[in-house]
Image (cartoon, rainbow, N blue to C red):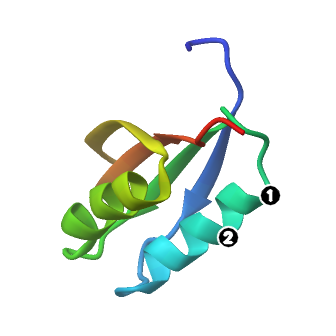
């Protein structure tokens, strides 16, 4: 996974439901299995992002702190 390209989405400053909606839109444009890293500082994203991934079939690989926000590494569901 270290050499795989990662698409970044900066959703800092956006409030619920915008971080999830923007992640959904960005993931639609990516190939199955692609990686998306979302930065979000909305407190609700801690609940919303894992729920979105579970409902949509994406894999939440990690949830960490980075650049003053929560960073979510998501693998798009297979085709």
Q: Residue at x 48, y 42 (%)?
A: 74
Q: Residue at x 43, y 72 (%)?
A: 12
| Residue identified by numbered label 1 | 29
In the image, residue 59 above or below residue 2? below
Decide which of 61, 13 is in the foreground and name it: 61
Crowding at mark 2 (Cα within 10 Å: few <14, some 14-19, many 20+): few
Q: In this view, does 9 lie to the left or right of 18?
A: right
Kindly state the secondary structure of the residue where label 1 is placed: loop
Q: Where is residue 68 in the image (x, y as percent from the top left)?
A: 29, 57
Q: In this view, does 79 lie to the left or right of 54?
A: right
Dots 1 and 2: beta carbons under 8 Å? yes
Picture quadrant where residue 53 is located = bottom left
Q: Position of residue 13 (x, y in %)?
A: 41, 81
| Residue identified by numbered label 2 | 25
- Give the CA separation, mark 1 to mark 2: 7 Å
Q: Where is residue 79 in the image (x, y as percent from the top left)?
A: 72, 39
User: Is any part of residue 68 visible from this angle?
Assistant: no
Picture quadrant where residue 77 is located = top right
In the image, residue 27 above or below residue 75? below
Q: How many labels does the image show?
A: 2
Picture quadrant where residue 1 is located = top right
Q: Is residue 11 left or right of residue 50?
A: right
Decide which of 20, 3 is in the foreground and name it: 20
């Amino acid at each position: 996974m270290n050499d795989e390209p990662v698409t970044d989405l900066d959703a800092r400053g956006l409030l619920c439901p915008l971080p999830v909606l923007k992640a959904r839109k960005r993931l639609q444009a990516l190939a199955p299995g692609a990686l998306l890293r979302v930065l979000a500082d909305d407190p609700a994203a801690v609940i919303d992002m894992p729920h979105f991934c579970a409902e949509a079939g994406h894999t939440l690989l990690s949830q960490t702190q980075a650049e003053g926000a929560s960073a979510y590494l998501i693998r798009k569901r297979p085709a």
